[in-house]
Amino acid sequence: MDRLAFRLLIIVALTARGLEINTSTGKILEKAEGEDVKLACSFTLAPEDTGNLEIEWSVKSIRHPLDAAEFLLYTAGHIYDTLYDPLKGRVYFDSEDPEKGDAAIHLLLLTTKDTGIYYCQVKKVVGIMRIYTVLRVLKPPSKPSCNYIEGDQTKVLRCRSQEGAAPIQYHWSRVAPGKLLPNSALLDKTAGTLTIHEANEGTYKCTAINRVGMKDCFLELNLPRPPTVTMIVGAVTGGLVAIMIIASITYLIVRRVWCLRHPPEAETPNEIVEDASPPQQTTRSVSPTPHAAAGRLSTIVTSL
């Protein structure tokens, strides 16, 4: 056995009974967009492990596993967390002192682009070990829209989310007067439809569900109500007003036609007679004075 092989055996032996990562590898986590996640990585050291502790976190794309990027590093007591722009400001160690055996990290405000294979590598001369975790960031269902269409003595309730990771299933339930669906209801969880008879009025709820979230919408179904007394009185009053308006318009039209067919006769203008004597003026009688009365008396006596 040559010296190189002998050295490799020594390294393997020391690694096997030295540094050890206690967290299992190959875990698969699914998280909703906008949530936070903790990626575990705990380890223990042996007296044989010497030198500086180094913890390195890196990520690979699921679609392109050969493309790896280091985004968090702990070495010689220092933390470097600005190595990878897409995760800058959104990643930190769970422990204030990772050297004590906790190399777990937190990722904040996840996006679908954070989906990948995350590697935790712990190294301390002469030991080195690594585990990986698969993280999938998915979109939860968007708030579904609820509506219905009329069928042949039935109503078809429809529910659909515009966004969300597939598969999405739709569950209908009855809010009032009871929580159970009618026995005759037909539910299609994939299409999001619920077919019921028209008599089954009430409030219905649709819940859109996928692996990382759920959202609800509500739909109110009411049967036509018989007209009340107020509605009847209102309808009668409205009908009478309409009849009066029509009668008034008819009268005006008939009167207008009659006037056009029977115009009024021409009136004779007043004439002024030129030879007519002017009206006599009325004179006021004046009482005679004493001298005039005496003169008239003497005249009457002479004539006798």
Image (cartoon, helix red, strand yellow):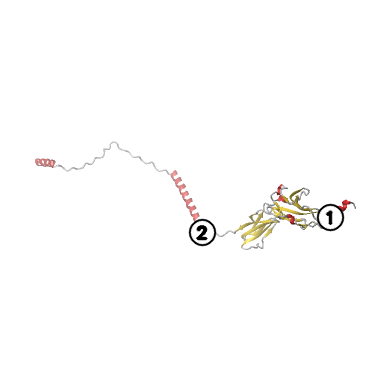
Q: In which image quadrant can residue 183 be found?
A: bottom right
What residue sits right under mark 1 in the picture? 12
Circle 1 crowding by C-alpha within 10 Å: few under 14, some 14–19, many from 20: few
Quick one: 211 or 263, which is closer to the camera? 211
Q: Secondary structure at mark 2?
A: helix
Please state if 300 lies on the left or on the right of 237 as rendered. Answer: left
What residue sits right under mark 2 in the picture? 230
Quick one: 205 or 194, which is closer to the camera? 205
Q: Which residue occupies the extreme right position in the image?
A: 1
Question: Which mark's residue is nearer the viewer, 1 or 2?
Answer: 1
Residue 103 seen: no
Where residue 82 appears, x then y in whole percent? Answer: 71, 48
Q: Quadrant of the C terminus?
A: top left
Give residue 252's mark: none
Where residue 14 appears, x then y in whole percent? Answer: 83, 56
Amino acid type at image mark 2: Thr
Looking at marks 1 and 2 on the same chain, the residue that comes earlier in the sequence is marked by 1
Position above or below: 301 against 56? above
Please state if 69 lies on the left or on the right of 285 as rendered. Answer: right
Quick one: 216 or 250, which is closer to the camera? 216
Please state if 70 lies on the left or on the right of 6 as rendered. Answer: left
Where residue 205 appears, x then y in whole percent? Answer: 64, 58
Where residue 95 appears, x then y in whole percent? Answer: 71, 55
